[in-house]
Amino acid sequence: MAEIDLKGVDEIIDRYKGEEGVLIQLLLDIQNEFYWISPEAIARISDKMRIPKSQIYRIATFYKAMSLKPVGRHIIQVCLGTACQIRGAPKIMDRVEENLKIKEGATTPDMRFSLRRVNCLGCCAMGPVIVVDGKYHGKVTPVKVKDILEQYE
Amino acid sequence: MEEMPRLNSKDDLNQLRRKIVGQRDLNMPFITLCSGTACHATGSDDVAAAIEAELKKQDLTEKVGVRRTGCHGFCERGPIIVIYPEEICYLNVTPEDVPEIISKTIKEKQIIDRLLYFNSETGERMVHEHDIPFYKYQTRLVFGDNLRIDPTNIEDYIALGGYRALAMVLHEMTPEEVLEEMKRANLRGRGGGGFPTGRKWETTRNASGEPKYVIVNCDEGDPGAYMDRSIMEGNPHRVLEGLTIAAYVIGAHLGFVYVRQEYPLAVSNLAIALEQAKEYGLLGEDILGSGFEFDVKVHRGAGAFVSGESSALMNAIEGKVGEPRPKYIHTSERGVWDKPSNLNNVETYATVPLILEKGADWFTSIGTEGSKGTKIFSLVGKVNNTGLVEVPMGTTLRDIIYKIGGGIGGGKKFKGVQTGGPSGGIIPEQYLDTPVDFDELTKLGSMMGSGGMIVMDEDTCIVDLARYFVDFLCDESCGKCIPCREGLKHMREILEDIVAGRGKEGDIELLKEIAGVMKKASLCALGTTAANPVLSTIRYFGDEYEAHIKEKRCPALVCKDLISYYIDPEKCIACLKCLKNCPEGAIEGEKNKTHVIDQSKCVKCGICFDVCPPKVGAVTKISGVPVPPPVPEEEREIRKGKKNRRRGGRWQ
């Protein structure tokens, strides 16, 4: 996952040919397709779309949805929305961090997990919630964290 | 769906509606399944697959209709299915329940008691959705159609009278007449500002500059609120209809929908809706044969709270960083690409068709003096019935939380309710009878916001919560203006100190002073309202701040640095549960010997507290007093049958 196929980047750039104000949409497409935005991809966009690199970096660093680092095999999202917060989400985050020995926003050195904090997934009835690779685990307690993580290799 | 010729007139639309309705056999068994994001998370996809498989197995595919709808709102009990024509409502349905539902309820018309709503107060089981207290006390004008519509099928919306208001507006009303009606209805913006929609439209309509734009704000970055998402996912055509009406009034021919990419289902249902609306001649050139032309583009937001602010959102639509700009000139006059741009939120647009169809007089008969109509709230937190709730403006907080929300769970005491999102305020118990509308909430130091309503019980530490909001806003502040950027940072530092036991005399005054500057001098609404959670909590829960600062005590027993876990030797039954589960190996003990936490090793994760059997309740949290010294080794043994009881408690 570390290398981004620039052909794929070209295809995405072509989708937006001739349109105005598309940089954010384009970067989102690259993020969704490759899970991160590599320096090579940024160079390619800059080159093909005649947009200064500095402008692309400005956007890519401003938005939470965009990552400038490669991500691990599994993406864990711990919801820290208000509803989850008051139902004990901080304790869940603590447990995940302790188990993986990384802080939120980081990736484990073996590239197994990337850990992210999200502000509300909109399923507050299930809170506290953690999502691993799109699978929702609801009503999580600190005791359950280890078992959930062990399901993913 | 067979190929549908474009609708070229109001009559074409009416005919189509009659045709759709006429083709439907109302006596045919019909299953609707809630498939909003929350139900997706609780397994609605698996239930849908099970229904399909079971119908096939029992050879009923042709005889039973199935519809996957948007959110029904009662997220606590999802996935929800309703079986027509009897309108039997089953909650918390799992794939394992499906075969029984098909053979018993569909085939033999028998009701399965265990899947019904059970009212623990009266001991009754309820068959119909509308009898369940959660629904019974609501007025679902905007949200109610969600359960009757498959959002990916435009004909479901048309069958319920969808696009009728648009047809009427385009063929029978001038833009001025529509504007007049909207102004009379006094619909105030549902996104939080509460500005009258009619007046906003008028400003953009009268502003000089062409072209003009209309924009839907579906950014909804407010954590704990998801009503806009549920409308967009569950009934996108209603939003598009409202948007098109706005475009007609304002004279816009291009609209944008700004939707968070964190809402993938909303993005995809919206895309489908746009395509279908174009196909049916309800969007694009010559809409319904009226000569009016209007098109819509979708812009996905990339995860920035501040981008929900109008000028920031418009920057983002232009492809720039979503930061606010000074609004000496309103965006309604100079917005996207410096052209007049009207921005309303999802719920506001979704209310528009209703007003035009039923009239401003009808609309103003609902609600309070200053706030008309209904409002959807996202009722979450420590409340029994989590979900989306639509009530007339002026309904009291108590009715929303207790009658509809079913009160607080686990026998706990209500502490406060936070309205208005991170920049709102927390309202304490003595104001529970306040009628909820724009003005009343502002008077209490909070605000309506987009409609988040987060209920807290006695286990929530108010100071920690204020810290949480400030921390959130600190991350989300774009950093462009100093009062917001630096003010939040310093408030965060002070609050972090207070919850860590480093609070000092004068902190509260300093917080208030910073808040005052931020309110006066910040560039956009994020900064001017950012201090609300701090100010409202100081106002109503000052004693909790004092306890943290002066006594180094957290009354709610939440703040890690101010609490300790302790095992009461009088209650411990030496079951080994906490000992085995402690991730740090901080608990000593063995079978028949009461357990003791080694405070130097304890990381305060709280697992021992969670696993200690509730009947035993030996693990406790204490704050503000020293942990009692451990019982000497030789006294820890629990004698057969009887515990080694000492007189009196060792701590209070």
Image: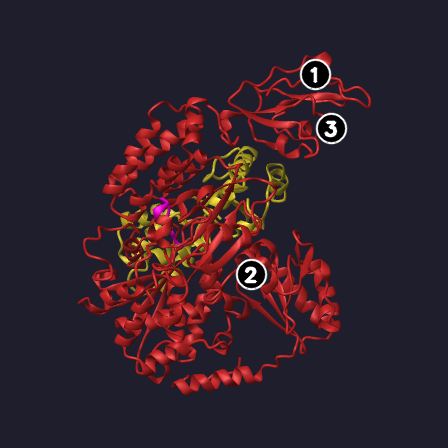
Chain colours: A yellow, B red
Amino acid bearing label 1: Arg
Disc 2: CA contacts within 10 A as few (<14), some (14-19) or many (>=20): many
Instruction: Check disc 3 and report its element: helix, strand or loop.
Output: loop
Q: Which residue is mark 2?
A: B135
Tag 1 and tag 3 share a subunit: yes
Q: Earlier in the sequence, mark 2 or mark 1?
A: 2
Magenta residues (range): B443-450
Dot placed on the residue nearer the N-terminal end, 1 or 3: 3
Tag 2, which secondary structure? Answer: helix
Left or right for B554, reference B497: right
For label 1, the residue is: B647
Instruction: Tell me whether the residue at label 2 lies in contact with that at label 3, contact meaning CB atoms closer than 8 angstroms.
Output: no
Q: In which quadrant of the rendered view does residue A48 lie?
A: bottom left
Question: Which chain does the numbered disc 2 sit on?
Answer: B
Which circle's residue, 2 or 3, is located before the other in the chain?
2
Whether residue B15 is situated above or below residue B147 in the rendered picture: below
Measure the C-alpha gap from mark 1 to mark 3.
22 Å
Camera sees residue A151: yes
- Residue B623 position, x and y percent, is 53, 24
Q: Is residue B210 above or below residue B627?
A: below
Seen at 53% across and 82% down, the residue is B20
Q: Find the distance from the CA under tag 2 to the CA under tag 1.
A: 53 Å
How dense is the environment of label 1, judged by Cα within 10 Å: few (below 14), some, or many (20 and up)?
Answer: few
